[in-house]
Amino acid sequence: MNNHEELTDREKELFQELHQPVEIHPGVEERLVQKLKNTGLIKDTKSKLMNWTIGIAAAVALLATGAFMGRYLINVAPNAEPSYNYMLVLYEDEAFSVGDPEALFNEYSAWMQQVYQKGITIDGQEMKPVSVIIEAEGQNHQPDKKVGGYFVLKASSLDEVIAIAKDSPHLKYGGTIEVKEFMIRN
Amino acid sequence: MQADKELVQSFLKTGSEAAFRDLYSAKTPDLYRLALHLSGQDQYMAEEAIQEMWLIAIRKLQMFQWRSTLQTWLTGILINIVRQLRRKAFQQAVGMDEIMKNGGQLQKPMDIDVYDLKSAIAKLPDGYQQVLVLHDIEGYTHKEIAEMLNINEGTSKSQLFNARKALRVLIHQNMKEVRP
């Protein structure tokens, strides 16, 4: 090294070495993509929620077009505005993890067919990943799991709905389901 | 520049994961190397800085006016984040006075290697370190550095002069400790 402002040849050589590419751990990219999806900054094109919705939508569409057995279609849509009396709230936390999208689609299709075949009306909706928690000043209750979606059903009993929920692919992938009965006032 | 514009336009148009990954792959390697140098070769800090940088950049990308290159803009964001992370981690670099106290005048070139250099860069005060890394390793001009660090070109030049001087003293001191 010298004492002058200019770099010596050796110094230049060393700085050049420090300019060599450095590989970043691939996990950084994955974590970042997940964060961007969670905050809605990029489209969740491959997400489990999307896969879930595709599965539901496809299964419903197949039934609605009569692709499955016609006799069940009568029970599916007896009128234009079906009423429901139970709700399945689908929760997800870090334990929730889905695998192959095609397998998931097939599983949801099979599950919904079973539900329809019991004469039960069912509908569902996915939820966007971002939530807004409103609470009184000074409180800080951050939920430890999020609602990934819900189903509403018209079933004959709570036991019947619990049995349906237990067969849902959502449980298999580590999610939890809350069964709620509607308060119906006459 | 044109390639960067296409990547950004593709992302802004689609907002897709694939378009983001293309952008990430194109820009991250150089920025990660810079983050490593600015964080004293702290891999975890550098990775965290890269993640934070992209989270901010993606939020602001729509407003990016292309008055500078994408690389310069991202680098400016990254430097601020590393600065904050270092402060948070209490990684206070040694002050210039402290460095020069026992430095003296160095007479002859010494046999140094890349590890001596890395170690000395990590010990430089923030301002010196940023200018030296950006100029001597990353190859930015003083004009670009001034823009990134929000300083004028003259300051960038004098910071570089002092940074090199401090770096040589630090290397000399390190070598005396290791090879007395």
Image (cartoon, coloured by chain):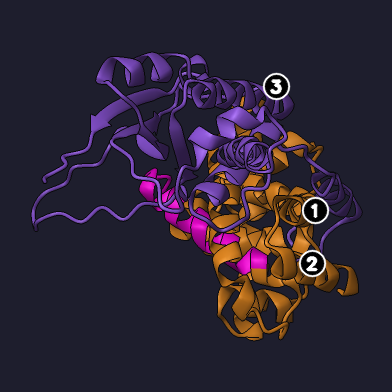
Q: Residue at x 64, y 80 (%)?
A: B147
Instruction: Identify the chain drawn in orange.
Output: B
Instruction: Residue B10: give its label.
Output: 2
Question: Which SS class for mark 2?
Answer: helix
Residue A42's spot in the image, x, y percent?
A: 61, 56
Can you tell which of label 2 and label 1 is closer to the viewer? 2
Q: Is residue A184 visible?
A: yes
Residue A40's spot in the image, x, y percent?
A: 52, 56
Q: Which residues are magenta?
A: B74-94
CA–CA distance in space, label 2 to label 1: 9 Å
Q: Residue at x 30, y 27 (%)?
A: A178
For the residue marked with disc 1, what is the amino acid?
A: Asp
**Where does label 1 land, which residue?**
B22
Subunit ID for the residue under disc 2? B
Instruction: Residue A160: give its label.
Output: none
Instruction: Identify the chain drawn in purple.
Output: A
Can you tell which of label 2 and label 3 is closer to the viewer? 3
Q: Quadrant of the C terminus of chain B?
A: top right
Question: Which SS class for mark 3?
Answer: helix
Instruction: Residue A103: give its label.
Output: 3
For the residue marked with disc 2, what is the amino acid?
A: Ser
- Mark 2 or 1 closer to N-term? 2
Decide whether the magenta segment is chiefly helix, strand or loop.
Answer: helix
Q: Is residue B134 above or below residue A82?
A: below
